[in-house]
Image: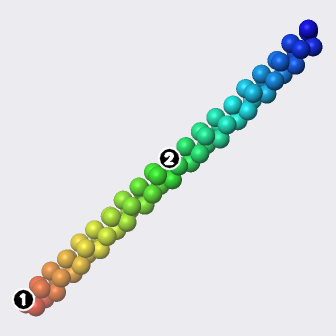
Amino acid sequence: MTKTKKRSNVVVKNVHAKIANVTLIVLTVVIAKTIRTVTNAKIAIIKDIAANNITIDIIIKADVVKGAVDL
């Protein structure tokens, strides 16, 4: 009877270890996806800022050219 009980304890420990491993893998995947999403959002914001800066730069240059023509 003792041997059976010990064996069942080992099985339970193995099941708990497998559940812990699966949980760890799932958490790792979720964290990785979150980091990727945040990174993509940052890249999109940077691209947006860069696009806006180019637009502002073109407007300023156009005003300078217009001022030069007015002279």
**Percent coordinates x, y for residue 51 in the rendering:** 31, 70
Quadrant in which the N terminus appears: top right
Residue 25: which quarter of the image? top right
Residue found 59% across the figure and 45% down from its top: 29
Q: In this view, does 16 lie above or below 53?
A: above
**Percent coordinates x, y for residue 35 in the rendering:** 51, 49
Q: In this view, does 14 lie above or below 37?
A: above
Residue found 28% across the figure and 68% down from its top: 52
- The residue carrying mark 2 is 34
Count neighbours of disc 2 (C-alpha within 10 A) and say few if under 14, some if 14 to 19, many if 20 or more.
few
**Percent coordinates x, y for residue 53 in the rendering:** 29, 69
Relative side of 17 to 40, left or right:
right
Which of 25/51 is in front? 25
Q: First in sequence, mark 2 or 1: give its number.
A: 2
Relative side of 37 to 53, left or right:
right
Secondary element type, mark 1: helix
Which of 61/31 is in front? 31
